[in-house]
């Protein structure tokens, strides 16, 4: 077994109003960052997972996202990285 | 009738629900600790408001895995009534008892105020004590009450008369100004397909006595009790 560290991004699904993202975008515009378009405010999770190989870590983290970490009605998730630690 | 009121760590409306059932209605109620596996013979389960598990991850996301929820889901699958208020509504959606999800209020603020609701369907076991289209004064108190579902789910809810309460203005119109949290179609409460699980963000259990501003919640409980002969 190897120790891995997995990182997951969870973001509000596009098309669903994200009032936090809109507020942040408005603040960035007022700072002069006029090139900023949509902003999504989500969550970033870092999980330490022990498994035989990276593929198993990815499968497990995917299932965690589907069952708990992300809401399938309103959020999208992406496994950003899995590295041996 | 016996009400079982589930207490999760962070529930804070369980006592309001108990007061409504026992003191206002004169019925029996028991608190059900979230780690229990037994509904203690409750005829009606109440998932009360509050901040179960501190709303960590998402409101209701962790509470849905509490041991008692297995029994609550089985109770609902038997067709028995479940009243899911505020955080209870969020938990019921996370548990798949009701479709959709409740997101951060569009204005980002926690809102605690009385609102006007319109009874959209008075032919349910939760609303038979109301007249169709009746306007109710019921308080809300939430930060994450923006009802959201995909288009086909919304169409089904509307088509099947499963939108039970809507936020409206004083004249009964579902305007955007009367929508406190940005819920799609001003939705404040829905039932499941079978009509035995009601989820709503407003708090009928806090509207049981004119002394506290409104007793418009009483008829909801009396409907569940079948006391209504209308």
Image (spheres, grey):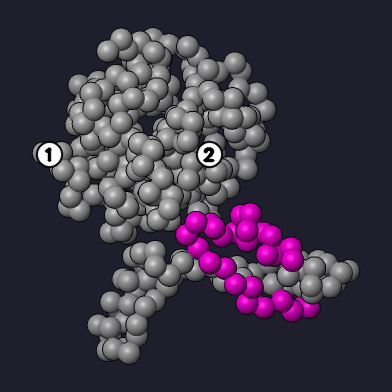
Give whichever of B31, A67 is nearer the camera.
Answer: A67
| Res B78 label | none
Residue at 11% x, 39% y: name it.
B171
- Chain of the residue where label 2 is placed in the rendered structure: B
Residue located farthest toward the left when viewing the structure as drawn: B171
Residue at 47% x, 59% y: name it.
A74
Q: Residues within 10 Å of mark 1 (few under 14, many from 20)?
A: some
Question: Is residue A83 within the magenta segment?
Answer: yes
Examine the rendered structure and indicate whether residue B214 appears above or below residue A52: above
In the rendered image, is residue A50 in sight? yes
Please provide the residue range marked out in magenta.
A59-85
Q: Residue B131 appears in which quarter of the rendering?
A: top left
Residue indicated by mark 2: B97
Question: Is residue B78 within the magenta segment?
Answer: no
Find the distance from the CA under tag 2 to the CA under tag 1.
Answer: 32 Å
Q: Where, quadrant-wise, is the C terminus of chain A in this rendering?
A: bottom right
Q: Residue B24 appears in which quarter of the rendering?
A: top left
Of the residues under marks 2 and 1, which one precedes in the sequence?
Answer: 2
- Chain of the residue where label 1 is placed in the rendered structure: B
Circle 2 — which element? loop
Circle 1 — which element? loop
| Res B170 label | 1
């Amino acid at each position: 077994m190897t120790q891995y560290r997995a990182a997951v991004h969870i973001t509000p699904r596009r098309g669903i109003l994200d009032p936090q993202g809109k507020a942040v975008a408005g603040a960035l515009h007022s700072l002069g960052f006029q090139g900023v378009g949509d902003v999504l405010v989500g969550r970033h999770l870092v999980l330490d997972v022990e498994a035989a190989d990276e593929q198993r870590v990815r499968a497990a983290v995917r299932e965690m996202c589907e069952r708990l970490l992300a809401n399938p009605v309103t959020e999208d998730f992406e496994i950003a990285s899995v590295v041996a630690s | 009738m016996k009400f079982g009121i589930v207490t999760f760590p962070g529930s804070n409306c369980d006592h309001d629900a108990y007061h409504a059932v026992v003191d206002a209605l004169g019925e029996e109620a028991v608190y059900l600790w979230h780690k229990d596996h037994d509904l203690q013979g409750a005829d009606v389960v109440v998932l009360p408001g509050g901040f179960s598990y501190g709303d960590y991850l998402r409101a209701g996301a962790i509470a849905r895995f509490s041991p008692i929820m297995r029994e609550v889901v089985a109770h609902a699958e038997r067709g028995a009534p479940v009243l899911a208020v505020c955080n209870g509504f969020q938990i019921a959606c996370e548990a798949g008892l009701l479709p959709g999800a409740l997101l951060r209020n569009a204005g980002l603020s926690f809102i605690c105020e009385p609102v006007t609701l319109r009874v959209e369907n008075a032919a349910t076991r939760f609303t038979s004590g109301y007249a169709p289209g009746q306007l109710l004064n019921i308080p809300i108190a939430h930060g994450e009450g923006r009802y959201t579902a995909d288009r086909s789910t919304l169409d089904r809810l509307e088509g099947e008369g499963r939108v039970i309460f809507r936020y409206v203005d004083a004249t009964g119109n579902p305007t955007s100004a009367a929508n406190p949290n940005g819920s799609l179609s001003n939705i404040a409460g829905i039932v499941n397909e079978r009509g035995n699980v009601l989820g709503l963000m407003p708090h009928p259990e806090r509207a049981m006595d004119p002394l506290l501003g409104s007793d418009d919640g009483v008829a909801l409980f009396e409907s569940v009790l079948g006391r209504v002969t209308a």
